[in-house]
Image (cartoon, rainbow, N blue to C red):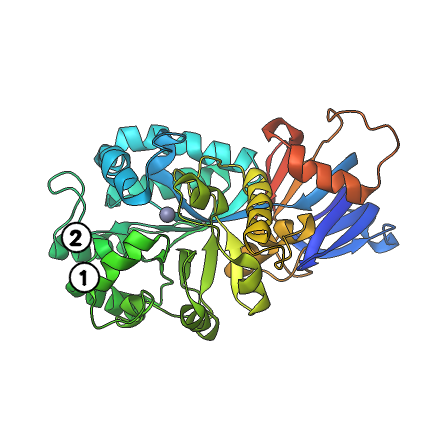
């Protein structure tokens, strides 16, 4: 089936540069991008037309790190540092997901909020509960969100009897969970919570499961200094945090590591060499006072960096807000670095929140021909009236800073219109 989206098309095929087609046509064949044209070629005139008029057609967002069961505690405990925050709030809330009815209710709302804010791809943590994790995957799939979800593994330093598995349980439940993952657009990813939560035996078993099932891995790395010191105590044989994953075969191509705020040069080199994705969570890093991640340095070194909302360490689910916070954090970094480090521009922030994340799922750069369409349609007509006509570039910048859920008129995910159709 041929479909055509008409409007002002804005995408970011490379870091820092936008491609804009004013009053353009995006041609889809069976949900797959055929091309972008300033005029509609005669051979495509028979397609089903979606005329978005004066609106902006932009890439949708990819949220590369967030905790689904922390959604109910969004905006809570923001005055606590990471490890206290985990123990005071997080583990108590996550333990509620033993109840699948409760999980259904929370995850349905989360999935709707994600998709209506234009997040069409995720790399997400569930809790340790197998059944609730299937519920999460089901609700995401129903709402039109695509990507990866992980049942969390944690057999130590949780809350015994409330939120902790035995090693044997953790392995058995992971295998049971994997056997029951039959979804079209949501796939499993191995998810050791972080090194302090997983015994050496469990990590070794997860390494075997990764190899056997050919799975990707997601976890946390070098988020704050107390955590790094704790990891060093737990693994005196490892000079750096990343080695505690590498030791068990969990540090590999497409491993997602959230934060990496305090990763030194050697740890960053290990990321580049293994094609590990840094899920930078600027909002969360500031909320729980972890630090300001040296994103510019990472990009200059050739690391693969994308963005995560990290709810509920982060307090903003919409990725357009995460992008602007990322940009602000980079400006703080510039000030801290005595003005030597250039901040992230709006097109750069947008690239990190879109293309860099979409690539994780096999997509090309920007709206690339051959990719399934992941797009949002933004209606900026109720933004403050400017004193002169704006260029599409200016309208794009305002859209990133000012858009809200109601500004997103339509969402396309995996080639299908899922919102505003
Ligand atoms: Zn996290």
Counting labels gives: 2
Q: Secondary structure at mark 2?
A: loop
| Residue that lies at the very extreme toward the front in this rendered image | 338
Q: Is residue 158 left or right of residue 416?
A: left
Mark earlier in primary sequence (1, 2) = 2
Labels 1 and 2 touching (C-beta < 8 A): yes
Towards the viewer: 161 or 284: 284
Residue 113: x %, y % from top left? 49, 32
Residue 179 position in % (x across, y down): 27, 55
| Label 1 – label 2 distance at C-alpha | 8 Å
Q: Residues within 10 Å of mark 1 (few under 14, many from 20)?
A: many
Residue at 11% x, 40% y is 161
Q: Which label number is shown at residue 155?
A: 2
Residue 52 left/right relative to 165: right
**Horizontal and vertical percent for residue 108?**
41, 31
Q: Secondary structure at mark 1?
A: helix
Q: Quadrant of the C terminus?
A: top right
Q: Is residue 372 left or right of residue 197?
A: right
User: x and y percent of residue 143 in the render?
Assistant: 48, 37
Does 254 sit above or below residue 387? below
Foreground of the two, 139 or 343: 343
Residue occupied by mark 1: 202
Q: Is residue 108 visible?
A: yes
Which residue occupies 15% across, 49% down?
Answer: 165
Which residue is situated farthest in the bottom direction here? 273
């Amino acid at each position: 089936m041929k479909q055509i989206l008409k409007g002002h098309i804005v995408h970011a095929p490379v870091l820092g540069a936008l491609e804009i087609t004013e009053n353009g046509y995006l041609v889809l064949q069976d949900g797959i991008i055929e091309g972008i044209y300033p005029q509609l070629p005669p051979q495509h005139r028979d397609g089903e037309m979606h005329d978005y008029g004066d609106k902006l057609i932009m890439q949708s967002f990819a949220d590369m790190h967030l905790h689904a069961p922390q959604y109910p505690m969004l905006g809570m405990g923001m005055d606590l540092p990471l490890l206290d925050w985990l123990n005071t709030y997080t583990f108590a809330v996550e333990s509620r997901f033993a109840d699948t009815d409760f999980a259904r209710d929370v995850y349905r709302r989360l999935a709707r909020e994600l998709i209506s804010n234009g997040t069409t791809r995720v790399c997400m943590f569930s809790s340790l509960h197998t059944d609730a994790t299937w519920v999460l995957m089901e609700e995401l799939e129903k709402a039109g969100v695509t990507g990866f979800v992980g049942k969390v593994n944690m057999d130590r330093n949780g809350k015994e009897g409330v939120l902790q598995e035995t090693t044997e349980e953790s392995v058995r439940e992971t295998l049971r969970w994997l056997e029951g993952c039959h979804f079209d657009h949501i796939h499993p990813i191995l998810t050791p919570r972080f090194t302090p939560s997983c015994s050496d035996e469990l990590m070794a078993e997860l390494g075997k499961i990764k190899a056997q099932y050919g799975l990707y891995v997601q976890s946390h790395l070098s988020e704050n200094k107390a955590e790094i010191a704790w990891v060093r105590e737990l693994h005196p044989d490892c000079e750096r945090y990343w080695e505690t994953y590498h030791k068990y075969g969990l540090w590999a191509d497409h491993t997602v590591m959230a934060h990496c705020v305090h990763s030194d040069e050697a740890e960053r080199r290990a990321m580049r060499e293994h094609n590990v994705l840094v899920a930078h969570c600027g909002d969360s890093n500031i909320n729980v006072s972890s630090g300001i991640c040296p994103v510019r340095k990472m990009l200059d070194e050739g690391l693969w960096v994308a963005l995560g909302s990290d709810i509920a360490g982060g307090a903003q689910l919409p990725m357009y807000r995460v992008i602007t916070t990322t940009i602000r954090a980079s400006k703080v970094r510039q000030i801290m670095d005595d003005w030597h480090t250039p901040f992230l521009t709006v097109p750069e922030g947008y690239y990190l929140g879109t293309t860099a994340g979409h690539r994780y799922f096999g997509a090309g750069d920007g709206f690339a021909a051959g990719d399934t369409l992941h797009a949002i349609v933004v209606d900026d007509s109720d933004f403050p009236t400017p004193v002169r006509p704006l260029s599409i570039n200016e309208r794009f910048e305002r859209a990133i800073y000012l858009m809200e859920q109601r500004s997103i008129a339509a969402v396309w995910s995996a080639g299908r219109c899922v919102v505003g159709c």
